[in-house]
Image (cartoon, grey):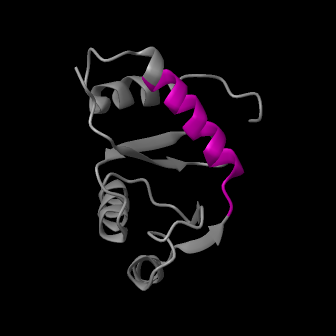
Amino acid sequence: MRQERAYILVDIDYFSRFIVTKAIKYKSSKTICDVIKEWIGLGYIPETLISDNGKEFMNENFKSMCRSIGIKTHRSNGRVERVVRTIRDAVVKLGDDMSLNEKMEIITDKYNRTYHIGI
């Protein structure tokens, strides 16, 4: 089974290391904003968003959404990049027998149940 190319959006609580993930087909500003609003609707309300310098995070649409919700934004990606690498490795290990969304549910749950030494 060939997997479609997808991007993984990760929200990590810097204190608890709890993550929320979403596989997305396009990493446009609109898609990113829609996912963040979805997470807020589920109760994951960030005080600050730290992102890389991707154009989807650097445009007025994204900045406007953050201002309207009261979310501060910063640029940095060390901790998130480490989580993304862990997720990528796990996706590969799970093989091609399930969809990326199914893999993300398993990986996110396992990650959130794992003790993290930095806590």
Q: Residue 45, located in which quarter of the rendered image?
A: bottom left
Residue 65 figure quarter = bottom left
Q: Is residue 15 visible?
A: no
- The residue at the far left in this view is 1
| Coordinates of residue 98 in the picture (x, y in percent) | 26, 19
| Image: 9 above or below 99 | below
Q: Position of residue 107 (x, y in %)?
A: 44, 25
As displayed, is residue 25 above or below residue 59? above
Q: Nearer the viewer, residue 91 or 69?
A: 91
Q: Residue at x 63, y 45 (%)?
A: 81
Does 46 lie within the magenta span?
no
- Residue positioned most to the right: 118
Q: Quadrant of the C terminus?
A: top right
Q: Residue furthest front?
A: 2
**Residue at 47%, 15% in the rendered image:** 93
Left or right: 12 with respect to 69? right
Residue 98 in view: yes
| Quadrant in which the N terminus is drawn | top left
Q: Is 104 rendered above or below residue 32?
A: above
Task: Give the total number of marks visible in the rendering.
Answer: 0
What residue is at 26 percent from the left and 37 percent from the top? 4
| Residue at horizontal 30 percent and vertical 57 percent from the top | 38
The location of residue 60, given as percent across then percent down, is: 43, 85
- Magenta range is 76-91
Dominant SS of magenta comes to helix
Residue 117 x/y as whole percent: 76, 28
